[in-house]
Image: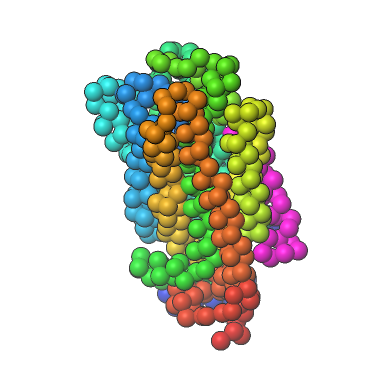
Amino acid sequence: EAGGMSVEFRQPEGLHGQSPGPDGHCPPSMPAPWSLPRWRAYVVAAVLCYINLLNYMNWFIIAGVLLDVQKFFLISDSNAGLLQTVFISFLLLSAPVFGYLGDRHSRKATLSFGILLWSGAGLSSSFISPQYSWLFFLSRGLVGAGTASYSTIAPTVLGDLFVRDQRTRVLAVFYIFIPVGSGLGYVLGSAVTELTGNWRWALRIMPCLEAVALILLIMLVPDPPRGAAEKQGCATIGDPRSSWCEDVRYLWRNCSFVWSTLGVTAMAFVTGALGFWAPKFLFEARVVHGLLLPCFQEPCNSQDSLIFGALTVVTGIIGVILGAETSRRYKKVNPQAEPLICAASLLAAGPCLYLALILAPTTLLASYVFLALGELLLSCNWAVVADILLSVVVPRCRATAEALQITVGHILGDAGSPYLTGLISSALRAGRPDTYLQRFLSLQQSFLCCAFVIALGGGCFLLTALYLERDQAQAQQSGTGILESENQRLIPGRGASPEDP
């Protein structure tokens, strides 16, 4: 890893495992090495981090102005949750398509298309009139489809530029922008609404930032060969191009990937519900405490969106760095460190979120403290789970693996959790007196399932730890491919070696 960052193209069929000749160079039949200076690799990482910031600002900018959107389009709680469900549904339907393209075609072109799609849909949604609310839902879906390209492909580019501790650190910085972007989405939405008196201007500012991102992507980001950073000498990891079905079959039999994906699903369920409804929950809690008056027409007080956004940014930065650094140090003494850290943080986050909800009607300060702790513990996992995926999956199907993890995580996670939370809240409210306190308690109680789901996620990561060493060894073997991974049946928890049957 020292010195310049030099990596090589994928070798053609029949050249697996060749070594440099006596003069230290690859045989004449092999392609010339592909190299990228170290400083340039870090520039690429910086550009991808900036786009990731915008990506997650798009996810939660609507949540920052949710009360205003509800008033403008006359949307109930259950239908407001459907906004995020439509967004996630389009994202999960698009993710497998972008995963397939990302493993087989130009990742740079696919990323550029995704940015154009989400920025164009976001801008057009700001001009939709109240009587065409269905068009607003559709535009949010198209934004989700655009962001799918980035969430699926960008981590694989970083995985092809960095390895080992470098990759852990770079992924930590990259995934810091999940909570930072989410928090800034709330902040931008609420701040622009305060300044202009019109929530739609928040959606008109984002495309300007995204135009800059597109220019930087085109000018500065290359498309490195798959698995480039992990090749040693002239060896190439991976077989000739497999079919999509073979890739899916390989991933289904990769136990570390399956269990970590279920753990990510639990995280997605909770972050989806929390991210969408928390600002409104905090607003209504302050109304119940007599600190604010109820909102009956737009623009509504957006201070809680600002507070929750700032809380998300701060806890996110601390959590991602803490999780990545703990993982980097702990895995030197325990190879199962990554899933164990994820499990511990989720099992601790559950009680924190439960206490944050239960204490909200009694003491706001304690509720904010436990909410911050819960968000911090959730944020510890973002970089770590990405590192798990990149370490247990062979390079040629990492985009497909990212896509499947995103798809499963969203289908069972945040595609339904905002809508489910709103639906339960509306159902509870229907059988109670129509008072503001009862409306608040209905939303509070609909949130409680999140604390139990996150504990299930912790259990999934404990199961991931049983298979991690075996799957990492298989993925790292020289010439490892789909057939080898399918045919080797090793005992869980046992490291693989070339001598294993």
Write the residue at 58% across / 16% down.
Answer: 291
Q: Where 463 sits versus 184, above or below?
A: below
> Residue 325: where, in percent of width, then height?
70, 49
Query: What residue is shown at x 53% (from left), y 42% (from top)?
Result: 448
**Main SS of residues in magenta:** helix
In the rendered structure, the answer to whether residue 263 lies left or right of residue 400 reads right
The x, y position of residue 184, in whole percent, is 53, 29
In percent of the image, x 34 and y 34: which residue is there? 79
Question: Number of callouts in the render?
Answer: 0
Above or below for 25 versus 90: below
| Residue found at x 55% / y 32% | 183
Q: Residue 302, can we see it?
A: yes
Residue 67 percent coordinates (x, y):
42, 23
Assess whether residue 317 is covered by the magenta stretch: yes
Question: Is residue 389 placed above or below 130 in the rendered structure?
Answer: below
Quadrant location, the N terminus = bottom right
Asked which quadrant contains residue 162, the reply is bottom right
Residue 368, quarter of picture: top right
Question: In front: 245, or 20?
Answer: 245
Q: How is the image coloured?
A: rainbow
> Which residue is farthest right?
333
Give the image location of residue 65, x and y in percent. 44, 24
Residue 473 in view, yes or no: no
Q: Is residue 72 above or below residue 344?
A: above
Asked whether 231 or 418 is in front, the reply is 418
> Is 248 placed left or right of 161 in the picture?
left
**Residue 472 drawn in magenta:** no
The C terminus - image quarter: bottom right
- Which portion, as a residue range, is magenta? 310-337
